[in-house]
Image (tube, rainbow, N blue to C red):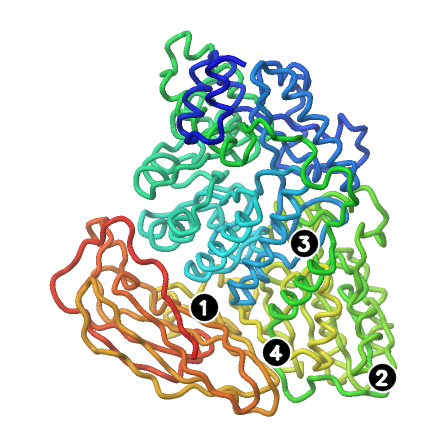
Amino acid sequence: MNIAESTWRNAALSIAERVDALMGEMTIEEKVSQLGSYWIRPQEDNDSGEGNVAPMEDTFVDGVSFTEEIQDGLGQITRAFGSFPVTPAEGRDKLAQMQREVTAANRFGIPALAHEECLTGFTTMAATCYPASIAWGASFDPALVNKMAQLIGQDMKKMGVHLGLSPVLDVVRDYRWGRVEETMGEDPHLVAELGTAYVRGLQSGGVHATLKHFAGYAASKAGRNHAPVSMGIREQEDVVFPPFERAIREGKVHSVMNSYSDLDGEAPAASHRLLTQILRERWGFEGTVVSDYWSVSFLQGMHQVAETLNDAGIISLSAGMDVELPETNAFRNLGRAVAEGKLEPGILDEAVRRVLTQKAQLGLLDSEWSPEGQWAGSDVDLDSSENRAHARKMAEESIVLLKNEGVLPLKNHASVAVIGPSASQPRTHLGCYSFTNHVHSRYAADDDHGIAMQSILEALRSEPNLNDSRFTYERGVDFTHPDVSGIDAAVEAARAADIAVVTVGDLAGLFGRGTSGEGCDVVDLALPGKQVELVEAVLATGTPTVLVLVTGRPYSLGQFESQVKAIVQAFMPGVEGGPALASVLSGAVNPSGKLPVQIPDHLGGQPGTYLTGQLGWNNDGVSNLDPRPLYPFGHGSSYTNFELKDLELSTTEISSDAAVLISATVSNSGDRDGAEVVQLYLDDKVSQVVRPRLWLAGFAKVRLAAGESKRVEFELHADRTSFTGVSGQRVVEPGVFGVRVGSSSEDLPLAAEFRIIGPLREVPEGRVMDTPVTVK
């Protein structure tokens, strides 16, 4: 061992010292190798599955062999577990073998960093599949999300994975976008709270989190995947950026991934403004920026801002990109670019330093590092009882009761007709990035889910509270197939029953292979396929009907609302979704979920969200379209009753850098235990720019026994009223602000005002972004 090696292997020294010593020994080509990646494509593993698992995957077919790729080292190994079906033990052993080859091939013995998807849990066979992100939003419970992420991180770390490609911090702007299911909703404060909790949880489990997709991806034109984004600086700064900024400043996240969609003509993978000026210079981000799959190559082929693939690599690295995923293409010739004077050596060194720093943080430069992972030589259980219990809790907490005219909880009816495609297909409970829908379904029969799951129908039949009921089932229609021949049988079943439970919704997939998910965008918000006809036919029978939606996005329910007796919304509740829904329907669980997105009234004309100015909300005759939703953001009912009263403000005047305490009492006035999400909203009475008519400033999920009351106190800093002013600078503006407290954005019984006094204040970087809450 030479002196330099003894330095960079010495864990007692600082990471910076170790990295500098290692870089001092590396050639340019060895440095470049740390910025690339390798993906064992399904084709290399005799894949027989149909369709891509990444956008335009089949257009990139001319990569080099693994042996060639690793000759000077390797930055990252792409998705050794989640690309094709392998058992956890096989995946662990395969990854370990790849790492042995990587370390043997480069003269420093540096391993690669292994990354994997983890949006609904560790994306590999037989791992617990948690609810989709949109369900996390419906839970309004950061502690639940934090614990889930910690469990995911612990499982991934034991298998030798270092980096998780989650969470998605995109704020929903158009419900037609297929990836709504991957988001946590339409409010930046809600997304920031939950997203930061996820980051902290995953990283406490030993795996680095990756924020995506920076930035503006969810606002693509017409909700079409990868479409351009037309968005001004104000919307970027006040709606899109805050969740990312908070996860960086407070969550100390280690990785960020760029967006595919160009932002006002600016391709994020080539944007020095986004990747360097904002992320690093303004927010202090010190981790690595990794490319979304092939997005560096897309600079040439799709965005057409680079003439050649080599130019694309130079442009992206210079903008602030550090690692090219999922394979090395545009970064392959960066060494030659330095030699030819087309790339500053210092720019290359900065990216390499960040990559090696991350590897050092994860222990990959330590002499005792082992490729086998912590589960080596032992049985692998990625679906533990602890995982399952938490998945069940998250599913139960995320289910939203939209409407109930006294028919829920279900009683022991003599006959219950269960109708619809969601009742018998557990895959509808899972998001598009679950292993089952993402990979397994491409290889297996429809009834093979790769993990034990119970359908809604099976769960209802085994629900103890309903064991005296007789259940009949008719599918009626499929999710997308045009065949309606089963509707007649569904109608007959409904007519013969005391009550009908109609289950409709989504079956997630990728790039058109599903009704929700990446590349599964829609032209309007009608239920997919012939499900509208099925619901209408059952309602026409006059049998009391409970409508159960298991979806990844909100769908228009206006044509049904007046006829159904109850509506239950579940947002892809995960592997325990069937039992959780049965427990809510039977009354064993009291629902407490709230809407993280609005439920539209009609099919079109409502692509926007509740975060709109007055002109975006008014129905005053200026248009024939009413933009208001059927059910607003934050809405959700319960089997008990809650009351809010005694709103108090600690003061009615604050300076522009001070805080006000806002408190109210929430009481459970019903006869059973439950949980209410107390929501704090603000509105700006007069402002120099058009602002949302109201916005969520804080929330707390409060659990109350029957008859119990608790006091909820929010600490609201003046920074929480700040916005991007006419000058383009963030400001706190003096004036009057409305305070509203309630149970949804439209159910706000408590109201007060406070005034910010003094001069206009320009807000520096590092503003207060949270609203601490105390419940007592």
Marks 2 and 3 sit apart, C-alpha to C-alpha, by 33 Å
Circle 4: residue type: Glu
Q: Residues within 10 Å of mark 1 (few under 14, many from 20)?
A: many
What residue is rendered at 64% in x and 15% in y?
Answer: 105
User: Where in the figure is residue 107, as x and y percent of width and height?
Assistant: 58, 14
Mark 3 residue element: loop
* Marks 2 and 4, the one that precedes in the sequence: 2
* Marks 2 and 1, the one that precedes in the sequence: 2
Residue 292, image quadrant: top right
- Where 276 sits versus 242, above or below? above
* Marks 2 and 3, the one that precedes in the sequence: 2
Residue 492, image quadrant: bottom right
Q: Nearer the viewer, mark 3 or mark 1?
A: 3
Residue receiving disc 1:
627
Residue nearer the viewer, 306 or 274: 274
User: Where in the figure is residue 80, as x and y percent of width and height?
Assistant: 69, 34
Marks 3 and 1 sit apart, C-alpha to C-alpha, by 24 Å
Marks 2 and 4 close (CB-CB < 8 Å): no
Circle 2: residue type: Ser
What residue is rendered at 82% in x and 81% in y?
Answer: 416
Mark 4 residue element: loop
Circle 3: residue type: Thr
Q: Nearer the viewer, mark 2 or mark 3?
A: 2
- Point out the image quarter for the C terminus: bottom left
User: Where in the figure is residue 516, as x and y percent of width and height?
Assistant: 64, 53
Marks 2 and 3 close (CB-CB < 8 Å): no
Marks 2 and 1 sit apart, C-alpha to C-alpha, by 42 Å
Q: Which mark is residue 469?
A: 2
Q: Which mark is residue 515?
A: 3
Residue receiving disc 4:
561
